[in-house]
Image (spheres, rainbow, N blue to C red):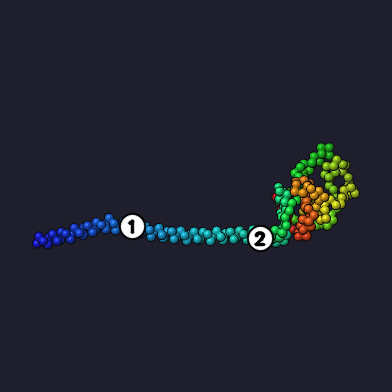
Amino acid sequence: MIRNFFIYLAVLIVGILFFASMVLFAIPAFQESTLALTGLSSSSSGSGEAGTDKESIEADVNKLQKRLDSFTPTNAYMVVNTSDNHFFLYKGKQLIRDGVCSTGKNEKLVSAERKYEHVFYTPFGVRKVLRKATNPVWKKPDWAFIEDGMPIPSANDPSRWETGTLGAYKMEIGDGYMIHGTIYKRRMGMSVTHGCIRLLDDDLEAVYKAMEVGSKVYIY
């Protein structure tokens, strides 16, 4: 009887110790494994969301690229950098020519005597080729005579017409501004003009042949 009691007691103690070891070791380990699985699941979910975000961003970029492409002319167009006095001739996205140019000198002509003011600058913005001509004749505006200290002649006075000054070609871009050649080759690459864009002879010929009436000129 006593022997059976001790056997029962020993079994009970072993059972209590086994239960205590489960509490101390097995349950925390199980909790850690559960947390690890939860973290893995969250990580997988986050990775999926990141993939979705990347696809969404790529789709937005493609839309913006298509929109940008829609603004790019398919025919020839010209870009003029007035700070560096440099031009770029493009056809679509392809650069087909670039070189030095001369742009407005950003000076103000004032004649108090004649109550006249005029600022010589190349206007920023987008313009179009309105008219083209070969061997152009320049009709001198009033400021050309005021600048030289000469009296202003009548509108159609022969002294207003001058040949050779604009080179072999001209392209009118509105408001009296033109793209043309020059006889002042040494001053190319400088801000010295009265607002027009001057090009060297070979560059002018290439631009004239590439650009059509309606072609755009971007000036900045």
Q: Secondary structure at mark 2?
A: helix
2 lies left or right of 38? left
**Residue 136 left/right relative to 21:** right
Write the residue at 9% across / 62% down.
Answer: 1
Q: Which three-letter amino acid code belongs to the residue tagged 2?
A: Ser
> What percent of the width, then of the height, locates residue 173?
77, 53
Q: Which one is earlier in the sequence, the residue at label 2 or at label 1?
A: 1
Instruction: Report the front residue among 147 and 174.
Output: 147
Q: Residue 198: percent from the left, percent from the top?
A: 78, 51
Q: Residue at x 84, y 37 (%)?
A: 113
Q: Nearer the viewer, residue 95 or 149?
A: 95
Residue 39's x, y, as percent? 40, 58
Residue lying farthest to the top in this orientation: 113
User: Pointer 2: residues within 10 angstroms few (<14), some, or many (20+)?
Assistant: few
- Of circles 2 and 1, which is in front? 1
Write down the quadrant of residue 17 in the picture.
Answer: bottom left
Query: Does residue 73 appear in the picture of this structure?
Result: no
Give the numbered dot on residue 98: none
**Alpha carbon distance from label 2 to label 1:** 58 Å
Q: What residue lies at 82% left-to-right and 53% top-to-bottom?
A: 167
Outermost residue on the right side: it is: 158
Q: Image height check: is 203 above or below 83? A: below
Whether residue 189 appears in this view of the structure is yes
Q: Residue furthest front?
A: 186
Q: Which residue is mark 2?
A: 70
Within the image, what quadrant is residue 207 found in? Answer: bottom right
**Residue ID for mark 1:** 31
- For residue 48, side relative to residue 215 (left or right): left
Q: Nearer the viewer, residue 167 or 146?
A: 167
Tell me which amino acid carries mark 1. Answer: Gln
